[in-house]
Amino acid sequence: MGGKYRRVLIKISGEALSGGKGTGYDIAFVTEVCESVKRCLKMGVQVGIVIGGGNFWRGVKDGAGKIERVSADRMGMLATAMNCLAVSDVFRQCGVDARVMTAVEIQSVGERHDVRKALEYLEEGKVVLFACGTGHPFFSTDTAAALRAAEIGADAILLAKNIDGVYSADPKKNPDAVRFDEISYDEVLARRLQVMDSTATSLAMDNGIPVIVFALADPENIVRVLNGEAVGTLVH
């Protein structure tokens, strides 16, 4: 059993799937991630996953001022669906049963999101990939991760990023930035630290779900977190 975590929600950025290329997929890297999650399942941990869409589309940032926010966000939802389809197939190649559930109706792509069905799948040892964010524009996939975590009663959100924790400032811009081992939700919000967006942080805080922020560059970190090792930053 993975320590105190019986059920977790892993949030993976779309860019992470590209393995540093920025766009598309690095299938070898995606396979490493899936194999790490497989080890978590063998530890008895139930796993839900939310994936961003940034390896295909960055919303209004990519719209050059010509694409409105609602359309841009819906395009991002479709990008997350593509990512969930890709990752679910890699999971199956690894011998893991993975199911895609979509927040918007997309026939043949995935099942319409249903909390009770998702819980059934998790109890059966299947990985559930939650696609299309919350199904609404103006809400990020970070917020979708916090929402799905609350819905399934996750013990923690594992926020797998391109950075190894929460810093006092952007370490790429400020060499004096300090990484926190632990930090409170209140401090994250008060200092406007870029852990998740404020809506996602508030949702996690209101539902008492701790967030562990760590680098996905080494997929083994997923297993280390569940083994209780001090990896990244704990937000609680």
Image (tube, rainbow, N blue to C red):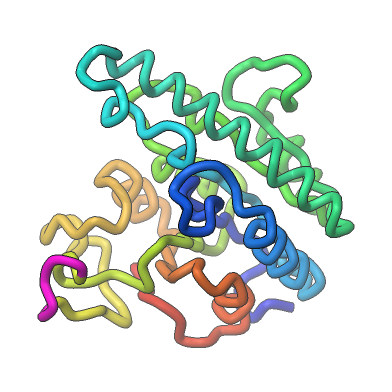
Q: Quadrant of residue 6?
A: bottom right
Identify the residue at image location x=39%, y=52%. 204
Quadrant the C terminus occupies: bottom left
Image side of residue 53 versus residue 105, left or right: left
Which residue is at the front of the view, 50 or 202?
50
Q: Which residues are magenta?
A: 172-176
Image side of residue 171 versus residue 231, left or right: left
The answer to whether residue 49 shows anywhere in this view is yes
The answer to whether residue 236 shows anywhere in this view is no
How far across and how far down the image is residue 111, in percent? 74, 26
Image side of residue 1 versus residue 176, left or right: right
Which residue is at the front of the view, 206 or 64?
64
Quadrant the N terminus occupies: bottom right
Q: Residue 131, relative to residue 13: is it above or below?
A: above
Q: Quadrant of residue 186?
A: bottom left
Q: Kindly give the residue lying farthest to the bottom in the view shown.
A: 229
Identify the residue at image location x=34%, y=72%. 165
Q: Residue 116, relative to residue 20: is it above or below?
A: above
Identify the residue at image location x=74%, y=44%. 88
Which residue is at the front of the view, 189 or 87?
87
How far across and how far down the image is residue 174, in percent? 11, 71
